[in-house]
Amino acid sequence: MVHALKTKKKLGFVDNTLEMLSREKDPSHFKLWNQCNSMILSWLSHSIKAYIVVGVINVKTVCQVWEDLRDQFGQKNVPTIFQIQKAIATMSQGTM
């Protein structure tokens, strides 16, 4: 997803380097910001499983969704990683 956002020059919405604009201070730019934010929210919601979308569907900004997903799935589970790597290393197909 990060690569896709970089390609579209939208990564600032995710990493919070592009701050949310104020409707009162700058209505014309806010409209454009809001349009891009909504587009990226749509991209995210269509690229993740439905049971995960339920947890972030009411969040208003891409940055908040990204932080929620990072908090939820960014935790490393070392024993699980080891088990997966071990299973991959010992995987075989028949006699191969």
Image (cartoon, rainbow, N blue to C red):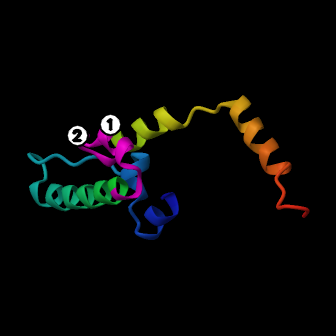
For numbered disc 2, what is the local secondary structure? loop
Residue 9: x and y in percent read: 41, 66
Q: Which stretch is magenta?
A: 46-63
Quadrant of the snapshot with the C terminus = bottom right
Residue under the image location 73 percent in, 29 percent down: 79
Q: Amino acid at mark 1?
A: Gly
Residue farthest front in this picture: 94
Question: Mark 1 — residue?
Answer: 55
How many labels sit on residues?
Answer: 2
Q: Is 6 placed above or below 79 here?
A: below
Report if residue 55 lies within the magenta region: yes
Residue under the image location 17 percent in, 59 percent down: 29
Question: Mark 2 — residue?
Answer: 58
Horizontal side of 34 relative to 68 (left or right) equals left
Residue under the image location 84 percent in, 49 percent down: 89
Residue 38 or residue 75, whichever sits in front: 75
Res 86 → quadrant: top right
Q: Residues under labels 1 and 2: Cα distance? A: 8 Å
User: Between tags 1 and 2, which lies in front?
Assistant: 1
> Is there any visible trace of residue 49 in the rendered image?
yes
